[in-house]
Image: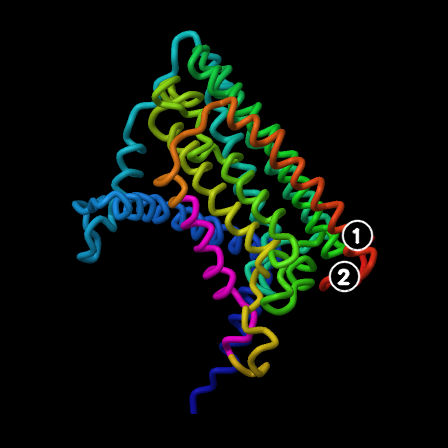
Amino acid sequence: MWEWEPIRDWLSGLITPYWSSPVLIAVQTLIVMVCIILTMAFYTLAERKVIGWIQSRRGPNRVNLFWVPGLGQPFADVIKLMFKEILIPADASGFLFRLAPFLALVPSLAIWAVIPFSPEHAFANIDAGLLYILALTSMGVYGIILAGWASNSKYAFLGAMRSAAQIVAYEIAMGFAMVGVLMAAGSLNVGVIIQAQHGLFGWNWTWLFPLALVYFISGVAETNRAPFDVAEGESEIVAGFHVDYSGMAFALFFIAEYVNMILISALTVIFFFGGWLSPFDGWLPDGSWLAAPGFFWFGLKTLFPMFTFLWLRATFPRYRYDQIMRLGWKALIPVTLVWLLVEGVMVYFHVGPWKGHL
């Protein structure tokens, strides 16, 4: 009779030396990056479909894939941008002009290293995960500033300066909102922050709703999305900081923007809506699959803030620059400071779901 065990042992001995931890991590990283890029691609299609539905029109419906109207549109866009020539202005700084798109994209992809997709799946379960996220989310502005400066164009430079001022204003409010999450969980570890939220009414949004609102609004502003898209104000500065970019150089900025939108949505779910925890935790028996934590709940929750990004773009007109600055400095930052004081009192007197982490 044919024996499988000797062949299996031989194959295991042949593959194991090469399937070491660095190789496994590299394969996992590649899989996650491909999934993120594909999600981003179909997110662009969803945006055009959703906005078309809100505005009573069809959206993309010509490039079909698997007999689904418009499904192939993201791939058509990628192919078009791949074969377009990358033009560099004569007076531009060539090296910095080429470097800027990568500086905008790389931090948005690197943050996913500490995102726990489920209880068992996180690349780096580090204790300073929250600090890592805060540091890398602040680095994307360098790519935008370099793009505006290296183009040697007044429109691009004006858009870069607008974006820099906007990100500085809203980064402070976002940081204070993350401090509230730190106080609630008592840890900088992203996995511990999720585990500290138990049950639907134990999620942070029930006690930190003002901070959740401020965090998401700041995230919309940080990604330069409507109605905070003055850095790309087509009616004023003809597309702003990437006005001189074309081809794949422009595509990298495009990818960075949508990856950041998905990232802000995921972080909002992690910090305030229980991450991969089930909303039925504590309401159903432990053996029920609806009560089990996992990637299903994380992905389902993330869809809601992702949809909100599209809803805001289709609903609100673009704010003026002075209105954006006033909202960031005079509204959101005071709200976070007041609520941090309220949360500190609640933690001190053991009010709410926290055990006291001050």
Q: Looking at the image, which residue is at 57% across and 78% down? A: 283
Q: Is residue 257 left or right of residue 184?
A: left
Quick one: label 2, few (<14), some, or many (20+) residues within 10 Å?
few
Q: Is residue 25 left or right of residue 40?
A: right
Identify the mark nearer the N-term, 1 or 2. Answer: 1
Quick one: label 1, few (<14), some, or many (20+) residues within 10 Å?
few
Q: Which residue lies furthest to the bottom in this view?
A: 1
Q: How many marks?
A: 2
Residue 15: x %, y % from top left: 54, 64
Q: Looking at the image, which residue is at 40% across and 23% down? A: 233
* Amino acid type assigned to the residue bearing label 2 in the image: Val
Q: Name the residue under label 2.
A: 351
Residue 197 inside the magenta-drawn segment: no
Residue 295 inside the magenta-drawn segment: yes
Q: Is mark 2 on a helix, strand or loop?
A: loop
Provide the major secondary structure of the magenta segment.
helix
Q: Residue furthest top?
A: 91
Colour mode?
A: rainbow
Image position of 357 with respect to 45: above or below? below
Q: Is residue 128 left or right of residue 254?
A: right
Image position of 220 with respect to 21: above or below? above
Question: Could you tell me how far apart the alpha carbons at marks 1 and 2 are, in whole angstroms?
Answer: 8 Å
Q: What stretch is highlighted in magenta?
A: 289-309
Residue 126: x %, y % from top left: 70, 52
Q: What element carries label 1?
A: helix
Q: Do the residues labelled 1 and 2 touch (CB within 8 Å)?
A: yes
* Amino acid type assigned to the residue bearing label 1 in the image: Val
Which residue is at the front of the view, 64 or 224? 224
Q: Looking at the image, which residue is at 63% across and 43% down? A: 133
Residue 134: x %, y % from top left: 65, 40
Q: Mark 1 points at which residue?
A: 345
Mark sitting on residue 283 = none
